[in-house]
Amino acid sequence: MKHLVFAVTNELNYDQRMIRICTSLAQAGYKVTLIGRRWTGSPALVPRSFQQKRLYCFFTTGKISYLEYNLRLFFYLLFKKAHAVCAIDLDTILPFYFISKLKAIPRVYDAHELFCEMKEVVNRPAVYRIWKKVEKFTVPKFKHGYTVNDAIAHEFYRLYQVQYAVIRNVPVLHPITIPEKPEKYILYQGAVNEGRSFETLIPAMKQVNARLVICGDGNFMQSAQQLVKEHALTDKVIFKGRILPAELRQYTLQAWAGVTLFENNGLNNYHSLGNRFFDYLHAGLPQLCVNYPAYREINNQHDVAVLINDLLPETIARGLNELLNNKKLYTRLQQNCLQAREAINWQQEEKKLLEFYKNII
């Protein structure tokens, strides 16, 4: 049985993309190990059809944290038999590069995003220089890889002449029934990170007659909570923190509308194709979304969202109020979501994933 090893830097229970990928490969007959970090207070691992390993690190923030995790990952992999290794984003790529060289096994790069173009990297010149050096050193040496949309794949080819496959991060197609929705709450799900436009989304809620429920955590969490206090919205903006995928699906199904907002402060956000966009779609949930190329392309085909051209509070509020009050628009978008999920789902993307690994192993 061929053994595939993957690694991320986050908490394994909440990484829906990796859960889908590893489950599909395990069901296809591969032995699969997914490695992540164990944080203080991490809940017990949810049993899966693949092996899971969490590495404990003494340091939890800053450059030393990444260095420690990468060293621990390298030495763990050194004594682990594998037939191929797959780095998830740039922050796990170095250990996999050196291990694949030492063991003469295939290496794969799974690029969820343009790592060096994230706001928290771009806006910190010293951090940007470090990660850009890592990217320039490693990515050209990872001839096998895949990413989440065509624009990011084209950018990798432009920069490093690597031809990466596109495997979109979309949910598994499950039967659903749209429930009665006594409360018209707006949902944000995903990382509460810099660049997600909380600076304008939160004040926009003063003009919207609904609650905003935020399910997630991240590097902008404290700032977002402070914004809520400053705008006197503590009863209107609710933070739920991280929620396990099964429970999160219920929050999504019960919501009235979703939001997918990214600041246009770098290629990563401009070419993004957020997980939440498809999670809302699969729950039959119309959404407010930025009018960036990947979202516009899908919306032109399926008409599932209200697209906005800027992130001003009044623009966001106007879009959300349309979803709350325009019944004809809402019903059309909801029905289009239910149709689109039949064409855009993991059962279709899974075929590309399995063909990819079949070709390199």
Image (tube, grey):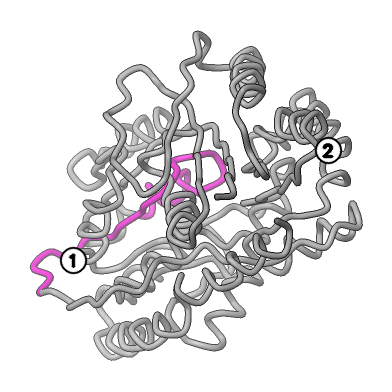
Q: Which mark is residue 138?
A: 2
| Real-space CA distance between mark 2 and mark 1, rounded to the nearest whole angstrom | 47 Å
Residue 358 image offset from top left, x and y in percent: 66, 64
Q: Residue 184 carries which label?
A: 1
- Secondary element at image label 1: loop
Residue at the spot x=41%, y=38% of the render?
Answer: 12
Q: How many labels does the image show?
A: 2
Q: In this view, does 324 lie to the left or right of 50?
A: left
Three-letter code for the amino acid on which mark 2 is drawn: Thr
Ranked by sequence position, the earlier of labels 2 and 1 is 2
Residue 91 position (above or below residue 287): above
Residue 145 position (above or below residue 74): below
Residue 218 image offset from top left, x and y in percent: 45, 34
Image quarter in which the C terminus is found: bottom right
Residue 166 image offset from top left, x and y in percent: 67, 67
Q: In this view, does 125 lie to the left or right of 234?
A: right
Q: What stretch is highlighted in magenta?
A: 180-204
Please tell me whether mark 2 or mark 1 is closer to you in this view: 2
Three-letter code for the amino acid on which mark 1 is drawn: Lys
Residue at the spot x=83%, y=63% of the render?
Answer: 163
Residue 47 image offset from top left, x and y in percent: 29, 41
- Secondary element at image label 2: helix
Residue closest to the eye, 359 or 205: 359
Q: Residues within 10 Å of mark 1 (few under 14, many from 20)?
A: some
Quarter residue 282 falls in: bottom left
